[in-house]
Amino acid sequence: MHRITMSLKTDLESDVEQSMSSLVRVSFDAGDEFLAVHWPSLCDLLFDIIRDELHYVKDNVTDDRVDDGTFLKRLERLNDASLVIRNMSLQENNAKRFATVNTPKDILVEGLNLPSHPSLAEVKSYFLDMAEVMAGFLPFAANDPLLEILTQGLESSDRGTMLGAMRAMCRFVMGRDDYNRMADIPVSSIRRITGILMLEDEELVSACLDFLYQYTLHGENIKVLLAPPEGHELIRHLVRLLLFQGITGEQLVYIKMVKKGQPPSYDIPHLPDEIIRELLAFAEPERATQW
């Protein structure tokens, strides 16, 4: 790993390509053991490579059918570095370190904002996966640019983009959407998501239900969701989906009898006459204290 790190710092094209290829293989074969805390300089270097190549690719992508060799090589390097970080991010400790130490939000926003070009579809999918696994650890602010780009993904015609955007947004706001930022999502996007509930696509329907659960945690959003005439139809579908992915069958329940304890006694205790005479010898409030 030290040799790979040193090779990535060189200007030798063959060494860089071989090192990136080795990292991709390692991230696939030993992703759970490839911990960023053990190789911090390597991870920092990978993020620097992603930033540099991302800027170049964004500025040089064209609609020409034939791309020049330099663009293709730098795009491949961007794909490889992003894939390595994506694979490592599947490990929770790595995702937390990347989100808090490497501050990748600018990379995610810029990567997800890349133009819709066939050659960029692969790397955009990696950025979407990274956004999903890091979302719970990323800082959350008002008018967050990452939340805005994920909101745009809800209108995508690509199934994978819409699915990833919903999952990432759910993780992004889970447990910390105190200001109801999901209320800023256009009503058209919400209606589109509720319409998907009628599809026979378990993965997509499951993501939509998770999204609607986060959305309805605020009462004002429920009013938007159930507004007529679509709201009445939505209720019917939600009732139908109450047992979605549920496990049917019989369940045997044992009821144990609980023995009740003896009720407390409220009877005034009987005191000997000598104790009563002793208490009467005291004046109040000393008598009450002695009692």
Image (cartoon, helix red, strand yellow):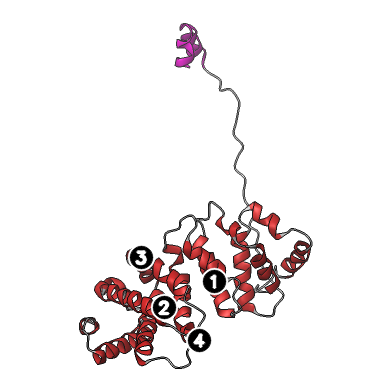
In this view, the mark in front (3 or 4): 4
Alpha carbon distance from label 1 to label 4: 19 Å
Tell me the residue that label 2 is attached to: 58
Quick check: marks 2 and 4 in contact, CB under 8 Å? no
Alpha carbon distance from label 1 to label 2: 21 Å
Type of residue at label 4? Answer: Pro
Quarter of the image for residue 17 reads bottom left
Tell me the residue that label 3 is attached to: 103
Quick check: marks 3 and 4 in contact, CB under 8 Å? no
In this view, the mark in front (1 or 2): 2
Q: Position of residue 237 (x, y in %)?
A: 74, 69
Alpha carbon distance from label 3 to label 4: 28 Å
- Circle 2 residues within 10 Å: few <14, some 14–19, many ≥20: some
Alpha carbon distance from label 2 to label 3: 20 Å
Q: Position of residue 174 (x, y in %)?
A: 52, 60
Q: Main secondary structure of the magenta part?
A: helix
Label 1's element? helix
Depth check: give the residue in front, 128 or 143: 143
Tell me the residue that label 1 is attached to: 165
Magenta segment: 272-291
Label 3's element? loop
Tell me the residue that label 4 is attached to: 118
Alpha carbon distance from label 2 to label 4: 13 Å
Label 2's element? helix
Q: Earlier in the sequence, mark 3 or mark 4?
A: 3
Type of residue at label 3? Answer: Thr
Q: Earlier in the sequence, mark 2 or mark 4?
A: 2
Quick check: marks 1 and 2 in contact, CB under 8 Å? no
Depth check: give the residue in front, 2 or 114: 114
Type of residue at label 2? Answer: Lys
